[in-house]
Amino acid sequence: MLKKRTKIKLGRIIAYVMIITTMLSSSAFAMEKPEISEQTEKRKTWQEKIDAELWEVMAEKSDDDLIPVYLWLKDVDREIITNALINEKGMDPAIYENQEWFQDEIVSEITRQIEERVGYEEAHKVVPPEQMSADESVLDAEETAVSAKAAENSKNDDEAFFDQSISLVDRAISAKVDEYIIAKREITKREYSTANDDFIANNIGKKRREIIYNSRYTSTLTVEATKVEIEVYAKKEVVEEISLYVELIQEPSLNLSLGQIGADYSGTKGSGFNSGNGYRGTGIKIGIFEAAGGRFDSSAPQLSGAVSKSRLFYSNDAGILGTGIIPGPTVTNHATMVTSLVVGQSVTVSNRTYEGVVPLATVYQTPINNSADVQRGMQKLADKGCTVINFSAGSDTGMGYDSFDKEVDKIINNTGVTFVVAAGNNGGGTNNVNSPGKALDAITVGNAQTKSNATTASSSPYSILASSSTYPSGSSFDHASYLPNKPDISAPGTDISYVWSSGTIQTMYGTSFSAPLVTGVVAQMMQAQPWLKTFHTAIKSMLIIGAKPGDIRMESTPSPNTDSTNAFAGNHLWTKSGAGLVNAPNAVNAVKNSFGYGTFF
């Protein structure tokens, strides 16, 4: 039985209020929709379930033509999932998804048990990286390598236990959160899969229609249907909406300085955080989507060696029925660089060191070609236990909230995964935010133009790159007026470098390379507070709270008197850069403060 909690720290209350305020101004709460009563919803005609675009297509088709459509079915009752977690797994979401209760019920018990078994000092001991011998280091291949097969099955690959810079207590707490996440996703997947498969068996199976997409985590199907079949589906109570499916080809968002966002060893990876060990992604599983079937180069200096054998996996299973994508994958600079920015190992060239934001994280890189691959791939990565996914690609679907965005939102909310996506580089063209960057609960990232590769690049302010927002022409990202502001936040994406080959540096620019930096910061936040792995809305809110709007201005040398058009709440910031430049220390400190650890930024 749950105990009644009445005491909450004042600082925590303030933090909660700030989180809720931020959430109300963005994400799922920002989209104004008319309230529909239950009775009104029941009176909705079957014609009203079919969207306008699909009606237009149907008018042009013959009776025998097959039309690809999204079938949006009624959602699974969340109470079924909650009861199954309690009865089958002995895990009450009311405890696991409430930080105060989780701390009292789970953390305190884990701490007590470990302290009793090994003693207080051993339970909380951490070893600074510089004090580890070679055979103790997480980067040692002989000590850390696990089989790719085991890792693909999300078994026996808990790299946290090879890293002594995290204590036994913290490892156990992180593992317990992961256990809950996997259990909830397992039950969620079972319930949605059963509901969708039953609909297919009872309504579609005998027609021998192609099932383009059968979601395992949402009540969504993509199928081929005739006009008569579409009408039949629309008349079924379980079908809430039918819309046209358009296969969107995903294109990389093309066209480093971790110090610019405080994610280097002077910031969140350094001695000022995590008892002197910094946050480098230990125990966090990250998914990376690569468009155009891209694959990272496993021979690239930052991605070769121990990391490629133990914590960096290539997972080509986003095709129909878990098969590989067609056409097959190709090694690309884009895929190599995005992956390097996240998990790249330390390599020094010409007295300059290059390293990813979270070099101790576990990464699964998955190639995709189209929107259905993304939807299937998100669920595959959720199966593997990933808690944050990076997507440096997208498609221009116009200004509105597309079906692609809608399904991505459903997957985010049903799996709890944090989804970071590049805003796109449509400057000089349509200016639209790419989909699925218009997903309400995605963290959409713009490109802050860094000054150069020189050491002075770490000094603010920065502008927004032309291809990221059409600056300096004055235009901004375009999206429908009913949508919340996008991008949500910005990160450096210009003159970003990685080690391409031995002694050779590759420099590129684009929102593709802004998003991985934010993904890395999210991983640091999750390491700092494992409970946040289950709370993607809090992650997004904390990032926005911690962003630095003053670091992005239109002029390169602003002053309070001449730069009035770029005030902290100015139009330039809001429509081009979102909340401002991501800041890792602020985000991590916000996490620690909001849940009772440390001070606010």
Image (cartoon, rainbow, N blue to C red):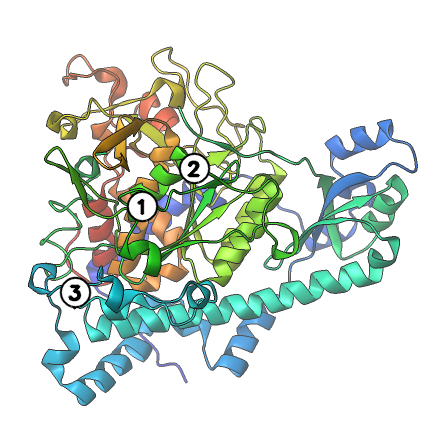
In the picture of the structure, the residue carrying the numbered disc 2 is: 392
**What amino acid does circle 3 point to?**
Ser
Q: Nearer the viewer, residue 297 or 548?
A: 297
95 versus 510 height, above or below:
below
Asked which quadrant contains residue 469, the reply is top left
Say which residue appears at 54% left-offset and 56% top-offset. 379
181 versus 209 height, above or below:
below
Q: Residues within 10 Å of mark 3 (few under 14, many from 20)?
A: many
Q: Considering only order in the chain, which callout, 1 or 3, is on the residue closer to the N terminus?
A: 3
**What amino acid does circle 1 point to?**
Val
In the picture of the structure, the residue carrying the numbered disc 1 is: 342
In the picture of the structure, the residue carrying the numbered disc 3 is: 165
Quadrant where the N terminus is found in the figure: bottom left
Question: Mark 1 and mark 2: span between their CA atoms?
Answer: 12 Å
Residue 319 x/y as whole percent:
61, 49
Question: Mark 3 and mark 1: span between their CA atoms?
Answer: 19 Å
**What amino acid does circle 2 point to?**
Ser
Asked which quadrant contains residue 283, the reply is bottom left
Classify mark 1: helix, strand or loop. helix
Q: Considering only order in the chain, which callout, 2 or 1, is on the residue closer to the N terminus?
A: 1
Q: How many marks?
A: 3
Classify mark 2: helix, strand or loop. loop
Question: Mark 2 and mark 3: span between their CA atoms?
Answer: 31 Å
- Asked if residue 127 can be seen in this view, the reply is yes
Residue 538 x/y as whole percent:
36, 53
